[in-house]
Image: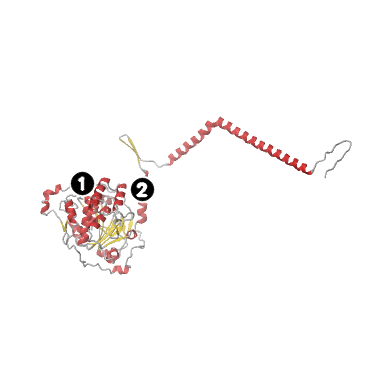
Amino acid sequence: MSASIFNNSSISISVSDEESDELSRIRERVRRKRKKQQVHRVKHEFSQRVLRFLLKYWMVLIFLPAAGLLVFEASRIGKRPSLDVELEHGEKKTTDLKINQTVSESKKKIQENLDRLDPPRCLKLLPPTELQHLEIPMHDESSPVKNVVYISEKDTQHGGNTTLPQLRTVGTRFNLFTGDQTLEKREKSFKVSETPQIHCGFYGENGGFKISDEDKIYMQTCKVVVSTCAFGGGDDLYQPIGMVDTSLQKVCYVAFWDEITSAAQELKGHRIGEDHFIGKWRIVVVRDLPFIDQRLNGKIPKMLGHRLFPHAKFSIWVDSKSQFRRDPLGVLEALLWRTNSVLAISQHGARSNVYEEATAVVKKHKASPEEVEVQLTQYRQDGLPEDKRFNGRKALNEASVIVRKHTPLTNLFMCLWFNEVVRFTSRDQLSFPYVLWRLKLLKDINVFPVCVRKDLVNSMGHISKAKPLIN
């Protein structure tokens, strides 16, 4: 409804309700527009002020962060440990901090692992009460190989001592110790007979690896041996743990050192006693090592234990980087006697193919590409397959622990393996599958998993790399 009122002093205009609402909306829109304009104006003015500030003080703004960064770096330099600096032939040399870090980590690892006697997870040992009364079996099984004849300097085919200096041939490392093995003789050595003839180190009295008569007499008394070696002063000697009293009475623990290691250990306070022992280890100091390569010298006690201990029936080899931590008679029972095996060795933890391992050896600079290629070329020519398994067994091994019975067949195998290592590379993982493939008669092998090897030893790692001997 609308209303009209008339009087003498004013005029009233009638307005409907709809028109009143429309006016309110218009006023609201005007207020919003003004507000937006005010906000925009404020922002514009702020931007203008910031821009004027930057244009006026840009040099100061750049200088302050730069100065702060310089102060920060200077404080860091002041806190760093000092480095040994040498000037030689005008060139500046600084100590590599990574080497110190590696040494520190190695010492920490050794301290953590040393004397750790965890219950075995994979190695099934007899209870200690049964180990105390465990007897060593001395009977010999029938074998196609009855006796191994080791070629010596007295053989007429070598012409006596006068020909020995000429034995080192181009491309090989055969010398007075190993004897001269041509490719023709190598091929013949794989043809098994009842009495095979083979080169197997200890070629003559002038060949090196000299041991005192007193040590030889002791070694001839050993029936069961746990052995290790450290040449070139590379590793410490870790005392075996975890054995029962019976094993201490029946087992020889022999560590082979050279004069360099003996002197290095004496500086650390590890002096050989008058009885030739340090702890449980009988120390045998070897003189006149036959090879410049210390890794190759280490293969002699590792592979030729049957030549060093002529009356031993069983042996366990342990690399110097490891601490043996189980009862040796219990290990023989678990890995050989219980499984009717004559050789037990650990599987390789990473690879199972010889040719893949060769690639890894070169990549890790453990052998030169040239010498590895010579070895692989020969193996391809001989027909070594690339199958990852031979007779159902993993091809590659991790030979830091070798448990074996000394039989004519296993002695022949170790001689063949040693000769391959001398001829080609000292990386014995490459030649083991080849010899196993060629010597098809050796089938009673226990290739145990890596977890068993970890139960057998505490792994310390090598302390340092042994330097080559000077020729």
Where residue 310 appears, as percent x and y from the top left, is 19, 60
Q: Is residue 166 above or below residue 347?
A: above
**Residue at the (53%, 33%) spot, across then down:** 61
User: Quadrant of residue 81 in the image?
Assistant: top left
Instruction: Assign a secondary structure to mark 1.
Output: loop
Residue type at mark 1 is Gly
Residue 49 in the figure: left or right of residue 440 = right
**Residue at the (47%, 39%) spot, across then down:** 72
Tell which of 466 and 262 is nearer to you.
466
Residue 19 in the figure: left or right of residue 211 = right
CA separation, marks 2 and 1? 36 Å
Q: If you read the primary sequence from the N terminus, does the residue marked by circle 2 or circle 1 appear first?
A: 2
User: Quadrant of residue 134 in the image?
Assistant: bottom left
Q: Which residue is mark 1?
A: 171
Instruction: Assign a secondary structure to mark 2.
Output: helix
Q: Which residue is mark 2?
A: 102
